[in-house]
Amino acid sequence: MYTEQVTWLPLIEEINTALDSYLQVKEAEHAQLYEAARYAVLGAGKKIRPLLCLAAAEMLGVPLDQALPPAVALEFVHCYSLIHDDLPAMDNDDYRRGRLTLHRAFPEGLAILTGDYLLTYAFQVIAEASNLDPRTKVRLVQLLAQSAGGEGMVGGQVRDIDVDGHPLVLQQLKEIHARKTGRLFKASILFAAVLKNVDSTVYAELEEIAELIGLAFQVADDILDVTKSEEKHGRSSDMSNQKKTYVTFFGVAGAQNEVHKLLKQIDLRLDALPYSAQLLKEIIHWVIARCF
Amino acid sequence: MYTEQVTWLPLIEEINTALDSYLQVKEAEHAQLYEAARYAVLGAGKKIRPLLCLAAAEMLGVPLDQALPPAVALEFVHCYSLIHDDLPAMDNDDYRRGRLTLHRAFPEGLAILTGDYLLTYAFQVIAEASNLDPRTKVRLVQLLAQSAGGEGMVGGQVRDIDVDGHPLVLQQLKEIHARKTGRLFKASILFAAVLKNVDSTVYAELEEIAELIGLAFQVADDILDVTKSEEKHGRSSDMSNQKKTYVTFFGVAGAQNEVHKLLKQIDLRLDALPYSAQLLKEIIHWVIARCF
């Protein structure tokens, strides 16, 4: 169980330790698969999704050891999506998080397979978690698949590559982001709700709050993409690809204003819950703050 | 429930109907995802894995409606693996089953995403099956992930692209095939064992029989690859890629002899089970027969 002294810094260590232990090299004959997975997962990423999951679990009183495997699964799915999105046939990015993308650091075929491996492994990690009951596991698997699949993340990415270079109205941008990044964000919070087996009213409220968090993060990320140089940020800017972002619609100041409004809404609604959301709020503000 | 009149021909119709109904176009905004998935799944494929699963289920007395969703999941995973294996960064095949491969018929980025979608959807189909208890679903998810993941199919594919163009001994070829195609074959039979919740002795026996079936199919497929022309067979031959196959080790006649020996073993061991394996045996022989 989390103690009152826990802040989010030790949580990142818990996450990194768990990710590392799940990604040990299992078979020497194809060790490069595990090496590539470790390169992709254990890098400089911020581990936002597992952090949100653990913070929401802490808020609801879910033990850390129950929340960790699902949190790991979320990060695996996120990392797989980055690997595949970066491929030459999609965004064709050479750099991510200040390092070569996986298909530049390793053979492209291996990069595709590493993404496949991480996606598959995410479901295995949930199925094999030692201290969750079968009903909870099934709900997590279902939620993860819905969030990552055709009606979620993959569907968003299909729309994203489809609209590349085409004019885009704000509503379309919002819909794409709601799927491409929003659904997995939402799942990060809702995983905790499933683990706690909260009633449908609390679930629905957490779902809406999670949507706001996802949106705030996406707008903040679009700001970061513009205000930080490619060198510092360490990946090719969506701007250089002529992608429409929240900044192209609102400008930097307008987008920042939008994020502030969203943060206020999120704080108010978290405070209205019958739980202490201090840790979750801290993490949300920390994640967003780096964009200003 | 299956009736005694059922042979395997109506089962193929059941499978095709189920696959079709799972792959309805869900959202007009990214309809091309579902169109690509339908192209990849509903083509000329033989649906061997779902057929084996249903035949094994029939043998064990598992109702058809319980076995169909897991059988569909197996086919989705198989099709995803073909889509990704055919990509330029892997086998770079232009044709499969007499038609253009998915990345030749659709944009390559969409093909990658379609594979991701089918893999994710497979787990969702199991999680959402209406008439299976949670414990069974978790065991199916775990078995599918183990069979398809780093220690299974993906691991086999990593070894396969790693050894391309390198000398290969028979033992290595066997190990690669045992993972690349064998594990999902094994899962097809073992899915039925999980659905029936058979005891560990029967499970272990079915596991060994399933390994023999997978091996027989792989050797038969290698024969087919050589004896049928590329035009008739409808995909680039592994021979032309200088891949080592069972035929390069045994010759066509030697490989055919190997298949016959395996079929005899399989029949004997199926006959020794306390079930009627007539349908399963018919299907195995039908699948293999097309290679001669």
Image (spheres, coloured by chain):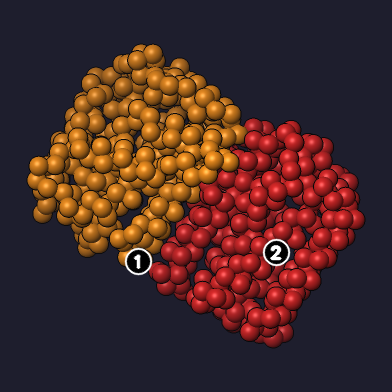
Chain colours: A red, B orange
Amino acid marked by disc 2: Leu
Letter of the chain that mark 1 sits on in the rendering: B
Q: Is residue A48 left or right of residue A249?
A: left
Identify the residue at image location x=21%, y=54%: B63
- Which residue corresponds to mark 1? B135
Mark 2 residue element: helix
The residue wearing badge 2 is: A212
- Indicate the quadrant containing the C terminus of chain B: top left, top right, bottom left or bottom right: top left
Left/right of residue B94 with respect to residue B256 in the rendered view: right
User: Who is closer to the viewer here, A56 or A33?
Assistant: A56
Q: Position of residue A168 (x, y in %)?
A: 73, 40
- Residue A183 vertical placement versus B12 (above, below): below
- The 10 Å Cα crowd at callout 1, few under 14, some 14 to 19, many 20 or more, is some
Q: Nearer the viewer, residue A58 or B152?
A: A58
Q: Quadrant of residue B79?
A: top left
Looking at the image, can residue A50 be seen?
Answer: no
Q: Can you tell which of label 1 and label 2 is closer to the viewer? A: 2
Please tell me which residue is depicted at 63% across the width and 73% down the height of the picture.
A56
Q: Residue, x 70% and y 64% (percent of image)?
A: A212
Image height check: is A133 above or below B75? below
